[in-house]
Image (cartoon, grey):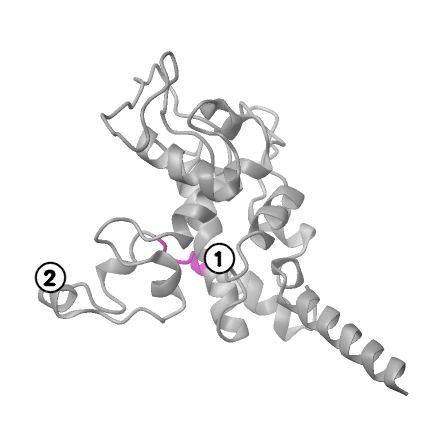
């Protein structure tokens, strides 16, 4: 009997873990459907941003897409996918399905970017390395590559090109930015999941709930509707 009870406990814990994973709210078909141009042959790195890489990265940040009720979880996923689609778009005003449907076109900043090196004792630049925008969030500057790399256990300060090589790492850097406090700005994750409470200084600066402070990570209505529809139909 004791063994049976233990098995039930283990199975229940496994079921809870499975239900909490981001993959339970967004399937591969949905990912492709929402970002239907990300594998276009004329995109420089078509096929680089994969569903499996996204889910693997998302599951490494336990609170992402698992906080609050189901609508809140879907809203955070939609907000993240929408923002990084905007950051990497190869679209134009009259592009098929709109300019931001052509996201995930680029892996790194275009043109001839500089080294983005800023004097920093904690995260010093490595000679010969450039810290320009890479990945879905276009992480830039040595003072971001350093702590992001430490958080995801990748030496990005010495090898910033990893963000443009390993498909899971760029998603992790994007999620790190979402899930990590950035100087005086509210934590994006807390704003989206409505856990953030404005301080007196925030209120004085008009940083309040449902105001411009949510501009950075605002869910794309169409993406949220797709996720919302999937649950109402009992699908993934």
Q: Position of residue 4 (x, y in %)?
A: 88, 82
Residue at 12% across, 65% down? 201
Helix, strand or loop under label 2: loop
Total numbered circles: 2
> Which numbered disc, 1 or 2, marks the residue that appears first in the sequence?
1
- In the rendered image, is residue 205 in sight? yes
Looking at this view, name the residue that lies furthest to the bottom: 1
- Per the image, the residue denoted by label 1 is 78
Residue at 36% across, 17% down? 111
* Residue 231 within the magenta-colored segment of the rendering: no
Q: Which residues are magenta?
A: 217-221
Residue at 60% across, 54% down? 59
Side of 83 relative to 187 (left or right): right
CA separation, marks 1 and 2?
27 Å
Helix, strand or loop under label 1: helix
Q: Position of residue 18 (x, y in %)?
A: 70, 65
Instruction: Give the quadrant of residue 113.
Output: top left
Is the residue under label 2 in contact with that under label 1 (CB below 8 Å)? no
Between residue 83 and residue 193, name the one nearer to us: 193
Q: Position of residue 66 (x, y in %)?
A: 54, 66
Instruction: Give the quadrant of residue 26.
Output: bottom right
Question: Where the C terminus falls, by quadrant?
Answer: bottom right
Side of 21 relative to 109 (left or right): right
Instruction: Give the quadrant of residue 10.
Output: bottom right
Label 1 vs label 2, nearer the camera: 2
Where 4 falls versus 139 (above or below)? below
- Per the image, the residue denoted by label 2 is 205
Dot 2: within a 10 Å radius of its alpha carbon, few (fewer than 14), some, or many (20 or more) residues? few
Q: Position of residue 61 (x, y in %)?
A: 53, 54
């Amino acid at each position: 009997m004791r063994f049976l009870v233990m098995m039930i406990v283990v199975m229940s814990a496994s079921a809870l873990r499975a239900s909490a994973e981001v993959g339970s709210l967004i399937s591969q078909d949905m990912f492709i459907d929402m970002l239907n141009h990300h594998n276009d042959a004329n995109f420089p790195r078509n096929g680089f941003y994969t569903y499996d890489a996204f889910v693997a990265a998302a599951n490494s940040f336990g609170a992402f897409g698992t906080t609050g009720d189901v609508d809140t979880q879907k809203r955070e996923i939609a907000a993240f996918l929408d923002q990084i689609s905007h950051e990497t778009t190869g679209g134009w005003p009259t592009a098929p399905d709109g300019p931001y449907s052509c996201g995930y076109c680029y892996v790194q900043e275009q043109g001839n970017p500089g080294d983005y090196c800023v004097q920093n004792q904690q995260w010093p630049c490595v000679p010969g390395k450039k810290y320009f925008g890479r990945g879905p969030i276009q992480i830039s500057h040595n003072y971001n590559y350093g702590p992001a790399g430490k958080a995801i256990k990748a030496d990005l300060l010495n090898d910033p090109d990893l963000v443009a090589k390993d498909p899971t790492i760029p998603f992790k850097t994007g999620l790190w930015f979402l899930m990590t406090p950035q100087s005086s700005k509210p934590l994006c994750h807390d704003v989206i999941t409505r856990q953030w409470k404005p301080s007196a200084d925030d209120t004085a600066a008009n940083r309040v709930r449902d105001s411009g402070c949510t501009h950075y990570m605002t869910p794309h209505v169409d993406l949220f509707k797709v996720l919302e529809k999937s649950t109402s139909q009992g699908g993934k």
